[in-house]
Amino acid sequence: MGKTADSLGPGARPDPVRSFNRWKKKHSHRQNQKKQLRKQLKKPEWQVERENISRLIQNYGKINVNEITRFSDFPLSKKTLKGLQEAQYRLLTEIQKQTIGLALQGKDVLGAAKTGSGKTLAFLVPVLEALYRLQWTSTDGLGVLIISPTRELAYQTFEVLRKVGKNHEFSAGLIIGGKDLKHEAERINNINILVCTPGRLLQHMDETICFHATNLQMLVLDEADRILDMGFADTMNAIIENLPKKRQTLLFSATQTKSVKDLARLSLKNPEYVWVHEKAKYSTPATLEQNYIVCELHQKISVLYSFLRSHLKKKSIVFFSSCKEVQYLYRVFCRLRPGISILALHGRQQQMRRMEVYNEFVRKRAAVLFATDIAARGLDFPAVNWVLQFDCPEDANTYIHRAGRTARYKEGGEALLILLPSEEQRMIQQLLLKKVPVKEIKINPEKLIDVQKKLESFLAQDQDLKERAQRCFVSYIRSVYLMKDKEVFDVSKLPIPEYARSLGLAVAPRIRFLQKMEKQPTKELVKSQANEVTKPRAPSLTNDEVEEFRAYFSEKMSILQKGGKRAEETEYRLNNGISDEEQEEEEEDEEMEEKLGKERWSQTESVTNTNETQKVKEVPVQLLDRDDDEDDGADADFLTVKRRDVFGLDLENKAVQKKESSKSSVKKKLTKVAEAKKVMKRNFKVNKKITFTDEGELVQQWPQMQKSISKDMEEEDDAGGINLDKAKERLQEEDRYDKEEYRKRIKAKHREKRLKEREARRETSKRQAKARDEEEAFLDWSDDDDDDDGFDPSTLPDPDKYRSSDESDSEDMENKMRYDLATYPYCA
Ligand SMILES: Nc1ncnc2c1ncn2[C@@H]1O[C@H](COP(=O)(O)OP(=O)(O)OP(=O)(O)O)[C@@H](O)[C@H]1O
């Protein structure tokens, strides 16, 4: 090794030969670069692009996941990398690292990773690259289809796509329900990357002329397990039928499907399974703290109110099981003024409102969002502190998705699940099986604010609110009834009158489908005795039946949403007004009854006496003491006994006491006769509706006057009460009277018929006589005519006149056809 100039000492001069060599090397390198650049500049842009692409494709084979940490380590186009950089995405998450390479190589991928782990980019980057590789242009039509289960998720994905893909030239479109179909139809043919919900996509496939997916390169199912489940089954099968078999398919979810049947439907080719957190200790994010409380159904509203009061500076999402619950409780909580802004998001809102709410909640720093499960999957609201599951999720997967709306991408968050005593054991078992670490915490009874009285007073003043409460009540009971897992959800264990009271209702509304439930045990018992099986089962539907209903209802809801066309997402979704909803509920009830072959439930559940109410209210509910919640000041200790049972209150004992008292309150079922007798005893007077005629005569409209009724009977009626024997007698009398009347009417009819026939006979004989006379007269006239001038043609109609009118008719017809074609420009 020769010595450097520095090593020769401060006064020594550098070796001129060495310096020259170094300069020469640099110079020639620069010259080469310039030459290359000049060459490139001479080449057309498409050729440069093509060379870049072939270089990228060559590098796909060399991808080594272990050496990759940044997006720029993947062989990606400059346009995609620039988009990622501008959106501040540099380092890869695990799922991105493990799936992007496989997808670039053209493989079908099934990706699963915890919520908030960056699955969206894991499929968006390959989407952009796939079309870039093919130099896709708008004339090539639809290249990629991204299907999301809800409109909000589709919208969110579309926004990320716009951000990351803004340097590419492809066109992207968002096709979700609730917008003008015609407007979408005009543009859909120019879209290269389509982000959509299943229902709307199918509607376009069915109705939009010239829309096809024959060039499709890639299909992406976000929240794949949800899209492939029964609620979307028919819609998805129809969509898949319209897609080419030769395509790449990517499926992503936090709870991935492994069902062979599902995957067979998609005809995947040797898919790569990437379960990033398969071996992780927990299936939920490590930064997510999860707890549950057990409380009685009728305490839940007060618990929620108390929770909100003590978390005024937090951002929370509260999940409910039905739209009507959200609608009612949203209104009620707005009136209660907890001191934090409340928003509601559910499928029955107008699309514009849904978007407004979504954006508003994204913007807000402290707010609470009441939502149904349309917000459970995929939504990436920033900085959500709490997820509260007011109603028990249908299964552990739903729990994971709901809870995953907080603690996203390295952030922290807390999840609280509210369980009924009847739901606790089985649900917790399921969660532990799914590797979800939940701890029980207690509620601080001193911090519980009872709002039942306030709700009662609201309902007393507002009929509309009362009706909403009733719908909320029925809707919740129905949601429990339709749940698949009967070991967790048991309608028969719900304290129904207490629940109605907790909503502010004095009387529980009737729930027709529960009548069947009440009848079922006896039937089943008989059946089981016949089979010599002595185990009586709890009344419930079979899993298959429930699954069928759920699919049926979700499909029905979606049909309604799309205005009677094909199924839209279960997402659940109507844009109707309140009166429509009422009607729907009635329809739903009726249809469900029809399906179940149910009889009408005519019994109104009565509420137990007020002393009992008092007792129920006295059941203490422990509130959670939250020491570390500085932001929320004095009220911060509502929810935190998660670390210690400060108050030492034994809720379990209370629950047992409650159960016993509710058992004793179960009444013997009354027959209709017994009920009538009971009513008789009360000596009710039936209201009457009386009107006056123009002449000033009194007419009783209701109850309808019986024509046969004798005066003394009327008088007896006035005495009040319902006398069964008298009523029977009266019915017989009425029956006789009706028969007599009927007989008279039939006689009169026969008489009329006979008269008519006689008249007809007379007419024919007259006509025959007249014809004979005319015949004789004609013979006389023809003889005379032979001697006359002959036939006068002017007596015939003018043929030209007829021709011209024919011509104008055919012209009209032509014009009409032209007009018809003009109205169908796509066919011209
Ligand atoms: N590489 C990354 N660098 C920085 N942030 C990222 C990266 N990838 C994703 N994120 C951010 O992480 C958050 C969650 O990402 P994303 O919504 O894709 O999660 P997900 O896995 O799809 O969640 P879910 O299962 O709930 O649908 C987003 O706010 C996103 O911007």
Image (cartoon, helix red, strand yellow):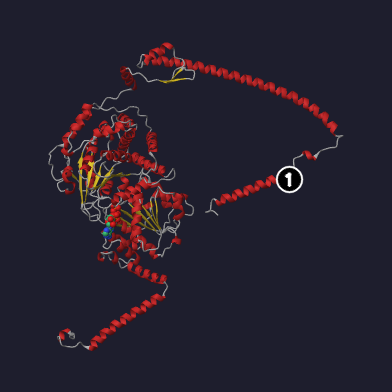
Q: Quadrant of residue 530?
A: top left
Secondary structure of residue under mark 1: helix
> Which residue: 20% across, 32% down?
617
77 vs 433, left or right, is right
Q: Cβ(mark 1) to ligand 1 < 8 Å?
A: no
Q: Quadrant of ligand 1?
A: bottom left
Q: Position of residue 99 (x, y in %)?
A: 30, 60
* Crowd band around label 1 with a 10 angstrom C-alpha radius: few (<14), some (14–19), many (20+): few
Q: Quadrant of residue 423?
A: top left
Q: Position of residue 275 (x, y in %)?
A: 27, 56
Q: Nearer the viewer, residue 96 or 445?
A: 445
Quadrant in which the C terminus appears: bottom right
Q: Position of residue 484 (x, y in %)?
A: 31, 41
Question: Hey, what amino acid is under mark 1?
Answer: Asp
Quadrant in which the N terminus appears: bottom left
Question: Going by the picture, which residue comes out furthest to the right?
Answer: 787
What residue does disc 1 label? 800
Whether residue 163 appears in this view of the structure is: yes
Question: Going by the picture, which residue comes out furthest to the top?
Answer: 712
Whether residue 149 appears in this view of the structure is: no
Task: Report how many numbered discs are placed on residues in the image.
Answer: 1
224 vs 191, left or right, is left
Q: Nearer the viewer, residue 322 or 696?
A: 696
Q: Position of residue 543 (x, y in %)?
A: 32, 40
